[in-house]
Amino acid sequence: MLSFDEYRSLINEHLTDFIPETDSKAAVLRESMEYSLRVGGKRLRPVLLLASCDFAGGDIMQALPYACSLEYIHTYSLIHDDLPAMDDDDLRRGKPTNHTVYGEDIAILAGDGLLNTAAEVMTGEVVRHAGEPEIMARHARAAHEIMSRAGIRGMIGGQTADVKGEYMEASADLVRYIELHKTADLITAPVRAGLMLAGADDSMLNDFTSYALNTGVAFQVLDDILDFEGDEELIGKKVGKDQDLGKCNYVCVHGLDAAKQELHSLTGEAKRSLEKYGNDAVFFTSLADQLEIRKY
């Protein structure tokens, strides 16, 4: 397997390769899409997809269109999250948000364009393998996994609960739903999709699904912690937004100390899911440890 940085470099090198050319009349659309893609980021989700495919013996170059498509989906969600009607952020990763540069209208369309492009790229890969039924089935499963976990029963459903959930009505059940769907679904999707592309069996899928879900929930819990006590310069945007907007999160419901304990517990559970793979799974267990102590 490659290192995290090597997977990320491969993704960055090919990130915009799959975006169709636009007519000059819509040139600003592609410019806006690429602006947000190139602002930066950890590339955690596409790296997880390539690494999972690699772990199960698949071809990471065959998985690359799916990895980039997943980053398109993640980036579209951030563009829309930053809009005045949602979180109303002026900065993303230390740079002006899409709508502050291109206006709300183009930002909305850029998000739409990234989501649609992701679907176009992945279904195109399915069609490309139409003459190879077994491989086509793997690609179809991976595409469906990503789109369904990004959809109304996944990320979008979680975002809906997030924007409508208010601090005074916060509950452990609501917070758990937001954690599982707003964040964890889009971390689980790449892991499962990468394994599907490689033809992994159900046992491996189950083990890695547990790993990804726990890692994804831990990721959101830490985001909630950082919203309370993070470094704005490191995070690249204003902290305390959840409090300002009256939104509920893990810290609001359970308190800061309990959130830190839960973060550590979830990280441990994620790593235990992969114990039987021993040192072969060190990429994933080490990543869980690194994510637990991230500062942004």
Image (spheres, rainbow, N blue to C red):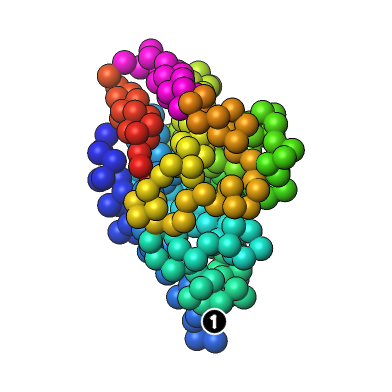
Who is closer to the viewer here, 64 or 129? 64
Who is closer to the viewer here, 125 or 264? 264
Question: Residue 106: image x %, image y %?
Answer: 57, 75
Crowding near pointer 1: few (<14 within 10 Å), some, many (20+)? few
Q: Residue at x 29, y 25 (%)?
A: 282
Q: How many marks?
A: 1
- The residue positioned farthest toward the top in the image shown: 276
Question: Residue 51: image x %, image y %?
Answer: 36, 37
Question: Where is 97 relative to 145, above or below?
Answer: below
Q: Quadrant of residue 1?
A: top left
Question: Residue 98: image x %, image y %?
Answer: 50, 69
Residue 238 makes an appearance in the image:
yes
Q: Quadrant of residue 50?
A: top left
Question: Residue 187: image x %, image y %?
Answer: 50, 38
Q: Residue at x 38, y 31 (%)?
A: 292
The segment highlighted magenta reads 260-278
Badge 1 is on which residue? Answer: 26
Q: Residue at x 35, y 42 (%)?
A: 295
Q: Quadrant of residue 2?
A: top left
